[in-house]
Image (spheres, rainbow, N blue to C red):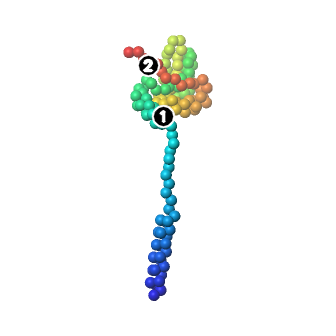
Amino acid sequence: MTSGNTKFKITSFICLIFISSLVFSQEGQVVINQDKHITVLLDLKKEINKNETSSERYKIQVYSGNRSGAYEAQKEFSSSFGGWYPSMQYETPNFKIWAGNFRTRLEADRALKKIKRKFPNAFIFKPKKEKS
C-alpha cells in the first residue's frame, strides 16, 4: 500500500506542477514603434550598395609628394598594414600612395582610424571615374 500511496503522491505532484504552470504562465506582445521612413531609407541604402561598382568604392590616401617619399611610404605601409595593399599613383606633379578598396564608408572609417596612427595625414576619398 505504501507504493500505491507514493505513486499517487508523485502523480498528484506532477499534476499540480503542470496546472500551476498553466495558471501562472504569462503572455506578452512586443510593439516596435519606428518612423515609416526608416524602412524606405534601408531599402534605398541596400539598392545603392547593390549597384556600386568597384570604381565607386572608397580608398585611403596615405601619401602625396615626391617619388622617393612615395616609395618609402609604400614600403612602410606594406610592413605596417599587410591586409590593405598600397598602390602608387601619379597625378601631376605628385606621386600618391592609395590603400584599400572599401565597399562602405564605415569600412573605410574603421581602417582610417588604424592607419592614422602611423600616417596622420591620411584621408578617405572616392577615386574619380575614368572617362571612356
Question: Residue 123 location in percent, x, y?
Answer: 56, 24
Which one is nearer the viewer's eye here, 128 or 20? 20
Q: Residue at x 47, y 69 (%)?
A: 19
Callout 2 crowding tier (Cα within 10 Å): few <14, some 14–19, many ≥20: few
Q: Quadrant of the C terminus?
A: top left
Which one is nearer the viewer's eye here, 105 or 89? 105
Amino acid type at mark 2: Lys
Circle 1 is placed at which residue position? 37
Q: Residue at x 49, y 23 (%)?
A: 126
Residue farthest toward the bottom in the current orientation of the protein: 1
Amino acid type at mark 1: His
Circle 2 is placed at which residue position? 129
The relative height of residue 70 versus residue 22 in the rendered view (above or below) is above
Secondary structure beneath disc 2? loop
Q: Residue at x 49, y 72 (%)?
A: 16
The relative height of residue 128 versus residue 51 in the rendered view (above or below) is above
Secondary structure beneath disc 1? helix
